[in-house]
Every structure is written in C-alpha cells, then in structure tokens.
Image (spheres, rainbow, N blue to C red):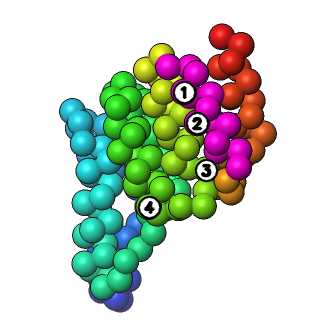
Amino acid sequence: MHAIPNALYFFFNKYQPISTIEFQEKIVTLPSGYVDYLIAKYDEIDQIMGNKNTIRYSDFKAIEAAILKNKAYNEFEKLAVLAKKMHPKSMLAEYHMGMMYENTGDNKKAAKAYQNAFQLNEIGNLTKDMMLKKADQLRTK
C-alpha cells in the first residue's frame, strides 16, 4: 500500500526545493562553496529528470541566507552570475551584487547595483520600491 507513494517520494526527493533540514544539516555547515552546492544539486536534478531546470527563487534565497549567516560575502558575486544565467530579466543578479558590495563596505557600488535592479523585473519579494529604498539608504550613509 505504501510502496508507490514511497517510490514516488524517493524518485522526486532530489527535485524538491531546499528544505529547512537540508539547509541546516548540509548547507550552513559547509565552510565555503554554497553556490557550488546549489549548482551540483541542480546538475543532479538535470541528470535525473533529463532536462535543464531553472533554479528556483527560494533556493537562491536559501543560499543567500547561508552566505549571510557564514559571512562569506564574496560568494554573492558567484551567486549573481548564476542568477543572471537563470533569471536574466529579473533583478535577482543585481540584488546579489548589491548585497556583496553592501556587506563588504562599498556603499557606492551597492547603491548603483540596487539602482540598476530597479530597471529589471521584480521576482519573489524583491520589488522596485525595495531596490530604490535600499539605494537611497546607502546614499545617505
């Protein structure tokens, strides 16, 4: 009775978004390579499913949280390159570049990145108003 649901769960287990358990046990504990983990996860999904999948916004946010928690701010640049590849018309890549600059103390470049994000499409909880607000806050510092 449980064989088919268990088989389906096992088959699609890798395809699921990053869970809280995966985040806490596998990602946050890494000393570095958070973006590499994300790339490897989706490469494995692509091999299993047989087609190229776009990385979910929620998975980008999970990796962003791991970067912030471990203060590995330089990984934002690699995450931004990946975001540009996966979501080229969204503001996600510019947002990640802004996060890198902001957390490394380059407020001028961070404000410019957030301002550039304003011109692109909104995604998830990233809005044009949010980008303008962040840019304005950094200019006044």
* First-in-chain label (3 vs 2): 3
Q: Is residue 91 visible?
A: yes
**Residue located 61% across and 57% down the image:** 90
Q: Which mark is residue 109?
A: 1
**Residue located 73% across and 24% down the image:** 136
The mark lying in front, picked from 3 and 1, is 1
Q: Amino acid at mark 4?
A: Lys
Q: Is residue 136 above or below residue 118?
A: above
* First-in-chain label (4 vs 2): 4
Disc 2: which residue: 113
Q: Are marks 4 and 2 in contact (CB under 8 Å)?
A: no
Q: CA distance from mark 4 to mark 2?
A: 17 Å
Q: Give the structural element (helix, strand or loop) at label 2.
A: helix
Q: Determine crowd level at label 3: few under 14, some 14-19, many 20+ residues with C-alpha closer than 10 A.
A: many
**Image coords of residue 77 (percent x, y):** 39, 40
Q: Which mark is residue 85?
A: 4
* First-in-chain label (3 vs 1): 3
Q: Amino acid at mark 3?
A: Met
The mark lying in front, picked from 3 and 2, is 2
Q: Give the structural element (helix, strand or loop) at label 4.
A: helix
**Residue located 46% across and 54% down the image:** 83
* First-in-chain label (4 vs 3): 4
